[in-house]
Structures are given as structure tokens and as C-alpha cells.
Amino acid sequence: MPFEPLKLAKHGGSSLTIDVQRRLRVSRAAMTELKLSAYQYVVISVDVENKRIGLAKQELAKVPNASAVKIDKRGYLGTKAGKEIVAKLALTGADLPAKFADIGWEDQNGVRWRGFEMESKDYFGPIAE
């Protein structure tokens, strides 16, 4: 039987994740896709109904009453943003870690957001005991 090559995805693609410590992280692929760099400010929005997160560069987002968050050198946006998203989406400890897959650009009220939709929990696979 001949060898069959594997087709492996590069680290899961463009996504956001919230880990069990409730830290929000932007994947390296998403950083590249959005042309974001370390120590740059972004604005975050949440669509509770569809369990989606929107991300926009601070200088491009003209959103009233919005706070900007700085990305650290590892792609983390911190626990404050993560905790706020967990609270708004009513996620529990059993729902974490949570992954939000890139769904593309979306224009809303003159702001161009990059959308990320929550994936099902089974992407982590079974946990070994």
C-alpha cells in the first residue's frame, strides 16, 4: 500500500480564541489577514444573537462610546475583553476554550468589521484522561 500524503491546515487558520483564563487572542493568520501588528489598537464588538465577534482597527473604526484595546506581542487582547465577551455571550467554564472562525468582512453603520463566528466545541478533539 503506497504512502498517502496528509493535508494539514496551518495552525487552524484565521481565528480568535478565548482560553480558560478568559484571555482573548488573535491568531497569527488573523493578524496577517487584517494587517495588524503588535501594540496596535483595535475595537471589538459582539453580536450576542449570532455569537459573533467583530474586530476593526482603531483608526478605521468611527464607533461612538467604544474603547480601543492594544494587542500585545503574542496576539493577546487581555482578560478584560475576554471576560466581557464571555459575559455578553453567556459562556460558562464548560464552553471554554472557545474558538471563533473568520467569516470575512461586514459593513455595519459605516464601520467595516472583520467577523468571527463561534465554532462548535468539538474542534479540540477528545481529551485524554
Image (cartoon, grey):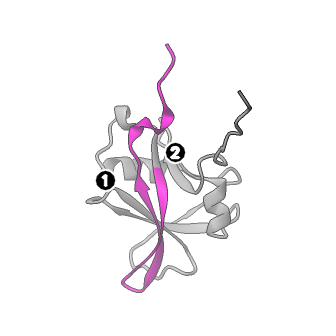
- From the viewer's perspective, is 10 left or right of 45? right
Q: Mark 1 = which residue?
A: 88
The furthest residue to the left = 49
**Whether residue 3 is situated above or below residue 8 in the rendered picture:** above
Q: Which mark is residue 42?
A: none
Q: Is residue 39 visible?
A: yes
| Crowd around label 2: few <14 · some 14–19 · many ≥20 (10 Å) | some
Q: Position of residue 65 (x, y in %)?
A: 39, 74
Query: What amino acid is at disc 1?
Result: Lys
Ranked by sequence position, the earlier of labels 1 and 2 is 2
Magenta stretch? 100-129
Image spot of residue 47 (x, y percent): 33, 63
The residue lying furthest to the front in this view is 1
Q: How far from the left and from the top, in percent, is residue 27?
A: 61, 53
Q: Residue at x 49, y 13 (%)?
A: 129
The disc at residue 23 is 2
Q: Is residue 54 above or below residue 101?
A: below
Question: Does 117 appear above or below 113?
Answer: above
Q: Quadrant of residue 54?
A: bottom left
| Of 26 and 3, the residue lying toward us | 3
Percent across and percent down for residue 16 are: 52, 53
Q: Amino acid at mark 2?
A: Arg
Question: CA–CA distance between discs 1 and 2?
Answer: 15 Å
Tell me if 95 is positioned left or right of 90 in this view. Answer: right
Examine the rendering and report whether any part of residue 71 can be seen: no
What count of labels does the image hold?
A: 2
* Image position of 67 (left or right of 88): right
Q: Secondary structure at mark 1?
A: helix
